[in-house]
Every structure is written in C-alpha cells, then in structure tokens.
Amino acid sequence: MKTDILFYELIQEFPQIFFEVILGRSGKDSGAYEFRAPEIKQPSFRLDGLFATRAGFESEPLYFLEFQTYADDEFYDRFFAEIFLYFRQYRPPNKDWYGIVVYD
C-alpha cells in the first residue's frame, strides 16, 4: 500500500507525468483534468443464481445465472459488478466462468 501512496502523491503533484509517460501525449493535456481518488462505496448485491463446482471439479467453469424480466438500462453494469465482486470476495479456484442471462 505504500507504493499506492507514493504514486498518488507523485501524480497529484505532477499530473502531466500520466499524459506524457503513460499516454505519450503532451503534458499540457493535464490541464483539462482533475486527479482524484474517490472512495467507491459497495452496494449490496445478490446473485440470482450460481452453479459453483464441488471440491475436485475446479477445472470446470462457474455459471452465473441472472433472470431479467424487465427493461433495465443498467443491467449489464450491475451483472458484471456482481460477478467481479464475487471473484474478489470468494476467490474461487475456477479459471473459467460464464454469465448466463435468461430474458422474459
């Protein structure tokens, strides 16, 4: 975590470094941006369903199941957020996974 603070302070002090070194653009582009590190609050999510493998079958994929019965412009944002939060919290050994959506 100490390196996070180092990079934060470096970019906070010299934002043009990001544009010049990382993006290969002129440092003057940094004037159009404000560098921040906002805290992201995690909403509560509940998966509609998950087919998780039993012990000994970790080479098989996980199946995330979602039933969508109404129009929702933010559906995919929420669905992928649920999946990635699951991986972060539970750290399953499975390398492969599928997201299955059943539409009404």
Image (cartoon, rainbow, N blue to C red):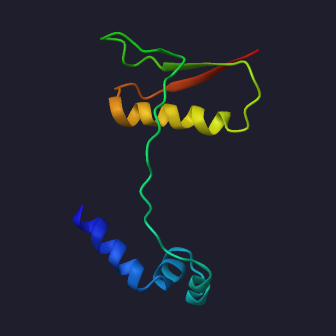
Compared to 1, does 47 lie above or below?
Answer: above
- List x then y, in percent, for residue 45: 48, 30
What percent of the width, then of the height, locates residue 47? 51, 22
Residue shown at 59%/87% (left/top)?
A: 26
Number of dots carrying numbers: 0
Picture quadrant where residue 71 is located: top right
The residue at 33%/77% (across/down) is 9
Q: Is residue 31 left or right of residue 43?
A: right
In the rendered view, does 44 fall on the left or right side of 103?
left
Query: In which quadrant is the C terminus drawn?
Result: top right
| Residue drawn at (47%, 38%) of the image | 43
| Up/down of 4 relative to 42, above or below | below
Q: Quadrant of the N terminus?
A: bottom left
Q: Position of residue 39 (x, y in %)?
A: 41, 57
Looking at the image, which is closer to me, 17 or 104? Answer: 104
Q: Nearer the viewer, residue 73 or 91?
A: 73
Rendered residue at 44%/16% (across/down): 60
Q: Is residue 68 left or right of residue 1?
A: right
Q: Residue furthest left?
A: 2
Q: Quadrant of residue 28?
A: bottom right
Question: Can you give x and y, in whole percent of width and height, for residue 79 in the image?
Answer: 58, 31
Q: In this orientation, which residue lies closer to the viewer: 55 or 50?
A: 50
